[in-house]
Image: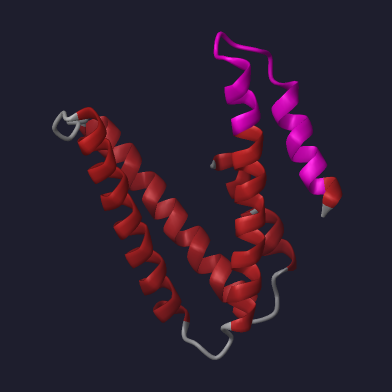
């Protein structure tokens, strides 16, 4: 586990420096490590929820995601004072595609961990750390 976290840090530090401040590089490292830890905890909790049907788990996952998205939009509105952003149809199509891929990945993750056959799926699911 420590080797995988070290690998994540190595990947992040190997990127060439951009014009951003040095603090954002460390913020990215902290957020990536936090994401890896959260994914690990999520997988452990999914294993503990063996007796709960996976659609119930996915319902609460989607509900929490929707509530967090509304909260982020509301906070952004109150900070900036500007109305919601309008995106192009291409951006909405890309967002829809990413949501479908994430939904399939979450279904696969939950079903694999609830059935105790999570070896290969857990390796693939940790790609989400780099995606985040």
Task: Please give left or right for residue 127 compared with residue 67 in the image.
Answer: right
Q: Which residue occupies the extreme bottom position in the image?
A: 51
Question: Residue 39: percent from the left, percent from the top?
Answer: 61, 58
- Can residue 127 be seen in the rendering of this structure? no
Question: Residue 28: percent from the left, percent from the top?
Answer: 60, 32
In magenta stretch: residue 56: no
Task: Please give left or right for residue 72 compared with residue 15 in the image.
Answer: left
Residue 115 drawn above or below residue 97: below
- Can residue 43 be seen in the rendering of this structure? yes
Rendered residue at 67%/45% (across/down): 33
Q: Which residues are magenta?
A: 4-27
Q: Nearer the viewer, residue 89 or 73?
A: 73
Residue 109 drawn above or below residue 124: below
Q: Which residue occupies the extreme front position in the image?
A: 79
Q: Nearer the viewer, residue 124 or 9?
A: 9
Q: Which residue occupies the extreme right position in the image?
A: 3
Q: Which residue occupies the extreme top position in the image?
A: 19
Rendered residue at 21%/30% (across/down): 87
Quarter holding residue 7:
top right
Q: Nearer the viewer, residue 72 or 56?
A: 72
Rendered residue at 63%/68% (across/down): 43
Question: Residue 63: percent from the left, percent from the top?
Answer: 33, 66
Q: In the picture, which quadrant includes the C terminus?
A: top right
| Dominant secondary structure (helix, strand or loop) of the stretch shown in magenta | helix
Rendered residue at 30%/58% (across/down): 66
Quarter holding residue 72:
top left
Question: Residue 92: percent from the left, percent from the top?
Answer: 26, 38
Residue 7 drawn above or below residue 71: above
Residue 105 drawn above or below residue 76: below
Q: In the picture, which quadrant includes the N terminus?
A: bottom right
Q: Nearer the viewer, residue 50 or 28?
A: 28
In magenta stretch: residue 14: yes
């Amino acid at each position: 586990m420590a080797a995988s976290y070290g690998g994540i840090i190595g990947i992040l530090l190997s990127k060439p420096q951009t014009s951003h401040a040095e603090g954002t590089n460390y913020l990215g490292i902290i957020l990536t490590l936090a994401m890896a830890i959260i994914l690990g905890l999520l997988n452990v909790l999914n294993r503990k929820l063996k007796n709960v049907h996976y659609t119930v788990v996915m319902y609460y996952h989607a509900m929490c995601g929707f509530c967090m998205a509304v909260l982020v939009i509301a906070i952004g509105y109150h900070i900036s004072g500007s109305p919601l952003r309008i995106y192009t149809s291409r951006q909405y199509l890309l967002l829809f595609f990413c949501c479908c891929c994430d939904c399939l990945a979450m279904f696969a993750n939950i079903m694999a961990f609830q059935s105790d056959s999570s070896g290969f799926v857990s390796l693939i699911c940790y790609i989400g750390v780099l995606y985040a």
